[in-house]
Image (cartoon, rainbow, N blue to C red):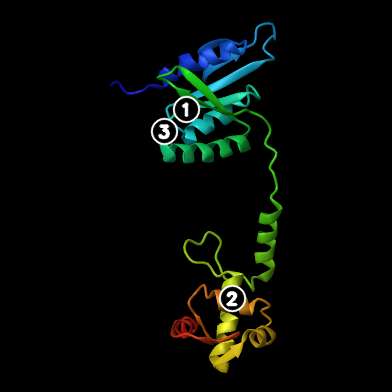
Amino acid sequence: MAAMKETDLYPPVKAHLEAQGFEVKGEIGPADVVGVRPGSKGDDIVVVELKRGFSLTLFHQGIARLAVSDCVYVAVAKGRGRPWLKSLRENVRMARRLGLGVIGVDVGAGAVKVYCEPGPYVPRKVARKKRAILGEFEKREGDPNLGGLQGPRVTAYRQEAVLCAEFLALAGEARGAEVAKSTGVARATLIMRNNHYGWFEKVSKGVYTLTDTGRAALSD
């Protein structure tokens, strides 16, 4: 079976645009596909860049074509399976932010599917995520992490867990309310009960002590 070529994507894309009322021609200047609606005097123009799969080059080309038209699509061969769907979601998300449309081409069936239309990107703010960012920022003591750090980070939660561990290292064992009052960590009981790091051990109802893992962590 012959390997797919970018030119194999052209007939389905051409047919799709012609069905929308465009006159379509391939390889016009730097553009793979250009469609112009008859009678629009060039005001209604669509540009499509073709690639067998998503790539940074494809998006670079799409962005460059925005100098010609506000209606620019990137078209790729339609794939199958979870990896393809994951790639599609991520690339459609990026295309929307760039103002580009995305077309998937089923070469075998000679059909296309438009996954998103070109247009200005209007980000949708998610209040829950904003609150989480601001909450972590306010609770974080100092600036213990380098921006761009790969691997474990010092979070506000970890900093509060350390305060609880330090208190127990001196007290031996204590009630959650006592730990909270002495350390200023309002969620001390929750932190010790959840025991995310394996540092705490429940002695009795509401009373906690430090584990060997917790003592080792404080030494580190």
Q: Quadrant of residue 43?
A: top right
Q: Can residue 48 be seen from the camera position used here?
A: yes
Question: Mark 3 or 2 closer to N-term?
Answer: 3
Name the one closer to the observer, 141 or 107.
Answer: 107
Disc number for residue 212: none
Disc 2 residue type (three-letter): Ile
Name the one closer to the observer, 55 or 77.
Answer: 77
Q: Secondary structure at mark 3?
A: loop
For marks 3 and 1, give the CA distance. 13 Å
Q: Residues within 10 Å of mark 1 (few under 14, many from 20)?
A: many
Q: Secondary structure at mark 2?
A: helix
Q: Position of residue 98 (x, y in %)?
A: 61, 35
Q: Is residue 16 left or right of residue 6?
A: right
For marks 3 and 2, give the CA distance. 44 Å
Disc 1 residue type (three-letter): Val
Q: Quadrant of residue 174?
A: bottom right
Q: Residues within 10 Å of mark 2 (few under 14, many from 20)?
A: many
Disc 3 residue type (three-letter): Arg
Which residue in the structure is indicated by mark 2? 191
Q: Are marks 2 and 1 in contact (CB under 8 Å)?
A: no
Q: In the rendered image, which quarter contains the N terminus?
A: top left
Q: Position of residue 177 (x, y in %)?
A: 67, 85
Which of the two marks, 3 or 1, is nearer to us in this view? Answer: 3
* Above/below status of 202 relative to 109: below
Which residue in the structure is indicated by mark 1? 76
Residue at 52% x, 72% y is: 196
Which of the two marks, 2 or 1, is nearer to us in this view? Answer: 2
Residue at 47% x, 63% y is: 151
Q: Residue furthest left?
A: 1
Which residue in the structure is indicated by mark 3? 80
Q: Residue furthest bottom?
A: 171
